[in-house]
Amino acid sequence: MYARLALVPVVLAVLTGCSSAAPTPAAPTAAPAALGTASPGTVRAARVAAPAKVAIPSIGVSSPLLRLGLNADRTVEVPPSDKGMTAGWYTGSAVPGRTGAAVIIGHNDTRFGRAVFHDLRKITKGADVTVTDERGKTSHFTVTSTESVSKTAFPTQRVYGSTTDHALRLITCDGDFDAQGHPVNNLIVYATLD
């Protein structure tokens, strides 16, 4: 029997370091709010198969999934720059297909060039996103909306907060570049389980 995990507030991150202009990977920037509770899917994550692959046929994405946790400063990890063509599932979010908001993060570009979510801005409402778990079970999600938001006004609660839906969020960098060569926005894709 699994013990219920103690849930502690964490500072969640927006995705940075996507620019190929950056000489080294940038550290994640903390989002403006902390998450006080986790979704019900998060507590059960240890009992179900973890996601292993994400596919978005309409934009040519097919990627294994890394497991992303928290950095020492309590910000959400992002995939390493040298694994730019690989997306990652934030293990503090729900397991895709379970109740709650599952979060998958990928770079747009890195200092090594084009990355896994380079074409995410081309995704349209109604597009299919498939997540396959370690046991081979697939969950299909339908894109309901997208938004590009400033990293300084990241909607932490809307993305990571508790929900009774079977939701999926895809996150990458977006927008113009700042003086350090980093995109100033995040692109967020919202999808729900079919």
Image: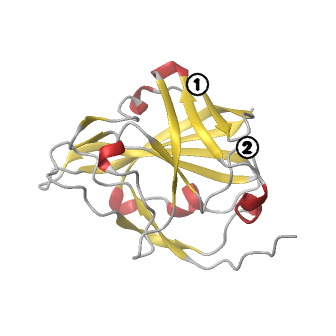
Q: Is residue 188 left or right of residue 16?
A: right
Residue 40 placed where, x, y %? 76, 62
Write down the quadrant of residue 121 in the picture: top left
Query: Label 1 is placed on what type of residue?
Result: Ala
Q: Find residue 189 and report its horizontal and vertical position in percent.
A: 51, 40
Q: Residues within 10 Å of mark 2 (few under 14, many from 20)?
A: many
Residue at the (67%, 67%) spot, across then down: 38
Residue 155, percent from left and from top: 48, 59
- Determine which quarter of the picture holds residue 44: bottom right
- Picture layout, residue 50 above or below residue 122: below
Relative placement, left or right, of 35 versus 136 is left
How many C-alpha atoms fall within 10 Å of the one at disc 1: few (<14), some, or many (≥20)?
some
Which residue corresponds to mark 2? 97
In-image side of 50 versus 22 (left or right): right
Measured Cα–Cα span from mark 2 to mark 1 = 16 Å
* Percent coordinates x, y for residue 64 in the rendering: 52, 37
Dot 2 amino acid type: Gly
Label ID, residue 127: 1
